[in-house]
Amino acid sequence: SANKINSCHDEMHFIASEQYKKIGDLSSVFNQCSSTCFNACYHGAVLGYITQSDLGGADDSLLGSLIIKACNLPTGAVREVQRGNCIHGVGHSLMLITGNELPKALSLCDSFGTGEKENCYGGSFMENFPNSSSSDHPSKYVKSDDPFFPCNQLEERYLSTCYTFLTDYWNFLNGQDVGKTVSMCATLSSEYANNCYHTIGSSSAGRANDFQ
């Protein structure tokens, strides 16, 4: 069920975070990870790294350097795949350390360069939208009476990724009625609607009630 998937993702976050605390090396933990449970192992390892770091009184500059350092893994084809998952995991983690302040998390994601910061945005948006994130830190930047929020309030550079991940929230609001979600995507401008359409299938499959 969808609950099983969410449980799997949350539990793997915890396991990988604890494994990092034991080993203390992201690359070593990543080498034990796989894509199981929507890459939750990678995300949890980064969460362990960031929560173990001394963030007391850290300003934005220090936080920015910390998250860049988190994903400076050895180079190579496999490592580049891991780096992408690492940066996405940073996006998840930034929501936790900022108290789910989405604008703050997105701003910190901007510490990464073009082509990578969007991956970080994705992790933050996943944490923000219900049915995509852990139930123990509820979303702050969603409005059931304004399903386009927060995308309709954010700066333009965040919109493509925001509308991509908003699809999962819309499926949640629409009771997995894909037709209703398609209709909502159709109201967006073409540059955002295309991303919206592309993620409807993966979002619906990931939350399918007949998952075994």
Image (cartoon, rainbow, N blue to C red):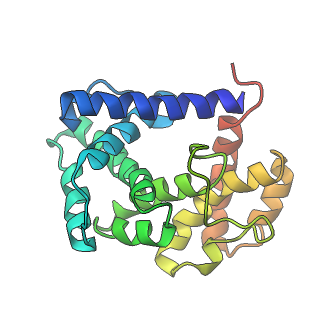
Can the viewer see residue 8?
yes
Residue 135 lies, in percent from the top left, at 61, 43
Depicted 12 relative to depicted 71: above or below = above
Q: Residue furthest front?
A: 56
Q: Quadrant of residue 114?
A: bottom left
Q: Nearer the viewer, residue 196 or 120?
A: 120
The single residue placed furthest to the left in the displayed view is: 74
Residue at image location 61% in from the left, 67% down from the top: 141
Q: How many marks?
A: 0
- Quarter of the image for residue 6 reads top right
Residue 46 in the image: state x and y as whole percent. Answer: 32, 43
Q: Quadrant of the C terminus?
A: top right
Residue at 79% over, 57% down: 182
Horizontal side of residue 154 vs 22, given as left or right: right
Q: Name the image quarter holding the N terminus.
A: top right
Left or right, 209 with respect to 24, comes to right
**Vertical order, 205 against 164 (above or below):** above
Task: Kindly indicate the quadrant of the structure image that contains residue 61.
Answer: bottom left
Is residue 34 positioned above or below 151 on the image?
Answer: above
Residue at image position (44%, 54%) is 96
Residue 161: horizontal and vertical position, in percent?
A: 52, 63
